Amino acid sequence: MTVAAPVLRHDWSLSEIERIYASPLPDLIFRAQTVHRAHHRPDEVQGCMLLSIKTGGCPEDCAYCPQSAHYKTDVKRTDLASLEDVTEAATRAREQGATRFCMGAAWRDAPKGAQFTQVLDMVRMVRGLGMEACCTLGMLTQDQANQLADAGLSAYNHNLDTSPEFYGNIITTRTYDDRLNTLKRVRDAGITVCSGGIIGMGENMGGRCRMLQQLATLDPHPESVPVNLLVRVEGTPLADMKAEDPIELVRTIATARILMPTSFVRLSAGRMSLSDEAQALCFLAGANSVFLGERLLTTPNPGTTHDEALLDRLGMRLTTSNASAPAHAGG
């Protein structure tokens, strides 16, 4: 049966989004599946691998983050990884089925000079292996964004994290506009945008919907929308938060899929607290990407073997192509 492709919209009202989010779960998932099938293969998910290339010591005070220098956690600070080490990790990721390799550095602003040049070399290396390359390095200048584009960067991750109204409860060291301005520079450079958020930080349903509205009213939509479930880490201000109901994660993913039909919705952090059945519901709701490997930056993640076994049980598979790679220089 052919499913009509929904019209892309960038004018979603908060009340519309709240009605979608709060609709009966069978209706919500059915609508999300209908949208999903119009744009994506329902039996495939993209495998991504995320490597921390510079860990800890970040001057930001993000309340969820064990890499913040403001908190005492078990995270050990490390300098920028060598090109050789990252090449080894990227090669291993490709062998495990990843088609996108993501590199994260705990900086407030991407540095200038030798360190940034080294990151550019890492981007070129990943693209040379035939994978998409994604970076999250903090805030960028326009010149830095342009240099990343010239190196062939496929995507830049810069999450909004939460709604503008709740943002101040989570972060005080940079503004919401700082985040939006970085996304604009990335877009202006011709790099695809990866931007999502975290649920379970104490926000209410309206706050979640407001975050989704911020993403869904960007024009164009982010090509990649990671949806994270808070990982509660000892030593951070959110360590004692009550565990979020996984159904709320399913609702967030389904709503994101409906609002942003062509985007990759990435089931990201927090999967260690989810049952296989909850993850299956996330896929049913429109998630079509997961992060492989045993760690996501500094927090645990199900291993690749577990993910392969789960997808096999579901009759699903990892995609083997780079269909979402952009067409700009080097990419």
Image: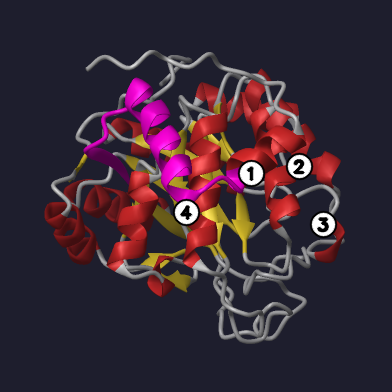
The x, y position of residue 325, in whole percent, is 38, 25
Residue 303's mark?
Answer: none
Helix, strand or loop for disc 1: loop
Helix, strand or loop for disc 3: loop
Residue of label 1: 158
Q: Are marks 1 and 2 in contact (CB under 8 Å)?
A: yes
Would you identify the image quadrant in which residue 330 lies? top left
Q: Is residue 81 visible?
A: no
- Which of pointers 4 and 2 indicates the residue nearer the eye? 4
Residue 250's mark?
Answer: 4
Considering depth in this image, is 7 or 235 the residue closer to the camera? 7
Q: Amino acid at mark 4?
A: Val
Residue at figure coordinates x 54%, y 72% from the top left: 231
- Which of pointers 4 and 3 indicates the residue nearer the eye? 4
Residue at figure coordinates x 81%, y 56% from the top left: 167
Q: Quarter of the image for the N terminus: give it.
A: top left
Q: Of marks 4 and 3, which one's residue comes earlier in the chain? A: 3
Q: Are marks 4 and 2 in contact (CB under 8 Å)?
A: no
- Which of pointers 3 and 2 indicates the residue nearer the eye? 3
Helix, strand or loop for disc 4: helix
Q: Are marks 3 and 2 in contact (CB under 8 Å)?
A: no
Q: Are marks 4 and 3 in contact (CB under 8 Å)?
A: no
| Start-end of magenta stretch | 21-48
Q: CA distance from mark 4 to mark 2?
A: 25 Å
The x, y position of residue 24, in whole percent, is 51, 48
